[in-house]
Amino acid sequence: MATGRTHRPATRSRGIPEATVARLPLYLRALTALSERSVPTVSSEELAAAAGVNSAKLRKDFSYLGSYGTRGVGYDVEYLVYQISRELGLTQDWPVVIVGIGNLGAALANYGGFASRGFRVAALIDADPEMAGKPVAGIPVQHTDELEKIIDDNGVSIGVIATPAGAAQQVCDRLVAAGVTSILNFAPTVLTVPDGVDVRKVDLSIELQILAFHEQRKAGEEAEAQAGAAMEAEAEAAAAAKEAGKGPDGDVPAVMPA
Amino acid sequence: MATGRTHRPATRSRGIPEATVARLPLYLRALTALSERSVPTVSSEELAAAAGVNSAKLRKDFSYLGSYGTRGVGYDVEYLVYQISRELGLTQDWPVVIVGIGNLGAALANYGGFASRGFRVAALIDADPEMAGKPVAGIPVQHTDELEKIIDDNGVSIGVIATPAGAAQQVCDRLVAAGVTSILNFAPTVLTVPDGVDVRKVDLSIELQILAFHEQRKAGEEAEAQAGAAMEAEAEAAAAAKEAGKGPDGDVPAVMPA
DNA sequence: GCATGTGAAAACGTTCACAGCC
DNA sequence: GGCTGTGAACGTTTTCACATGC
């Protein structure tokens, strides 16, 4: 036992840094894998490697949760799984609705990771009347008209938006009005929500664009070794572009650095 | 000059902070919308609102790119679109392969956001021979055997992994060996790659878990107002769980705080 | 001896507030 | 007068290094 009378410092439980929270699911996944292989204990070094972070960061992260390890030994895998699950709120299960059952919505409905750990797809909702009643991932799709009733009947507080961008804000407003307070948004739009509602967004094209940036940078570095002056020329081309008139059709100017 | 570290130390004045790079696609999207509505100029305040950030941050971000605004006026929309596109490397187009054409892979292939801005789906690849030849989003699926040839023929440097977790590392290794240097990973696994290869990951269940954490915290705050003692009881239940034997199937212990 | 847990230092990111320029 | 661009202040996150305790 962790020395019986450890009253939790109330200041700490609330103050887990956001960056730490974002990594807890990673640790949890690594720990679950170890648990399945019946590994009893793990060191910060090993676990960090499995989760793809460094061990100092992991230890610091865990220190916000409490002193759950044993010096000279490491962490008890089962115990940590439980503690992190509890901290993340996964010891209860969360009914979730997915709105927008296109390709992506169907993929999400079928995604095993949802059901496996604390989440239950309570309903699939789509605006297309053709879809209504059709089963996706074994769950019949319901029409948007039912949205408020579904949220209410199931006590749903987490909604997933997988609609086209144009519909997202409207769907979001309805979800929020119906009582949803956390939203995972896959539509490429900025959602506006009242205070107290959390939005996280997953944007496929943004991720690709970030990769493209780094990819270009790599290519640039290679070139740079050969011709260090190239960048200045590029900067001048840019300045020239600012001076020159822009393309008529709202497209990229014709001036493009080779 | 060999780059020893994972990320190059941003000593160079050229070094745009990672946090800024991650926001550029957001600005670009907002600007594109303005461009389509033929808005000629925009202030940092307006653009920031459209992108969902605050204006000081936006101005700071842009200051890393250069002085592209006009004091007292704002930013020229077309010009900024071009500058950000160029900075992100979107003035060239990037051939991309998607590996794993299940539900998610198909969703990605159909996702308009890819094609629209600098990315071109060069090939869809799946390990299932049944899939070979079938068109998804108008592109015939090719078998994994062809992977290396496809990468090589198309000069692909960006790969998207949408396979099951078990196959991801293997696919990743083959992509990297074939010359891919940027990977967008949708499989719930930590990928190990050599130096110089960038990996970004999109993890649906991690995002949900982060939402669950905040959701729980909200619920906890409400409860706390009524019964401040609840948390100590919870802490004891946790301690008891450490003592008690764990569930047989490597799952969360049966002891669950009500 | 060995690995955790944690203060203190360093790096990074955001916000402030105002000088500079249109 | 209005808005950008940016040093300086502030807050957060990461890293270091070692005291602490099994």
Image (cartoon, coloured by chain):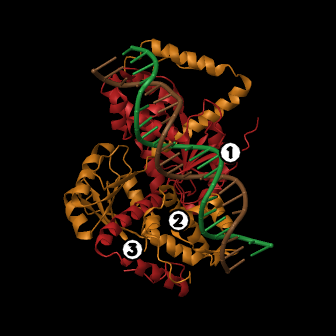
Chain colours: A orange, B red, C green, D brown
Residue A21 in view of the camera: yes
Q: Residue B120: x and y, percent?
A: 50, 37
Which residue of the protein is positioned furthest toward the bottom in this rendering?
Answer: B244
Locate the C terminus of chain A by quadrant.
top right
Q: Position of residue B26 (x, y in %)?
A: 42, 38
* Callout 1: SS: helix
In this rendering, position of residue A99 left or right of residue A82 = left
Question: What SS does tag 3 mark?
Answer: loop
Vertical side of A27 occupied by A92: above or below: below
Q: CA distance from mark 3 to mark 2?
A: 22 Å
In this rendering, position of residue B32 left or right of residue A211: left
Chain that bears disc 2: A
Q: In front here: B140 or A208?
A: A208
- Whole-angstrom CA distance, mark 1 to mark 3, is 44 Å
Residue denoted by label 1: B178
Above or below B4: residue A55: below
The CA span between labels 2 and 1 is: 42 Å
Q: What's the amino acid at mark 2? A: Tyr
* Residue found 34% across the figure and 36% down from its top: B50
Give A134 or A165, whichever is nearer the viewer: A165
User: Disc 1 residue type?
Assistant: Ala
Is label 1 in contact with label 3 (beta carbons under 8 Å)?
no
Nearer to the camera, A228 or A248: A228
Q: Nearer the viewer, mark 1 or mark 3?
A: 3
* Residue for badge 2: A64
The image quadrant that residue C16 belongs to is: top left
Q: Which residue is mark 3?
A: A92
Callout count = 3
Quadrant occupied by the N terminus of chain A? bottom right
Question: With respect to residue B186, does B34 lie above or below?
Answer: above
Label 3 vs label 2, nearer the camera: 2
At a point 38% along the width and 72% down the height, the residue shown is: A93
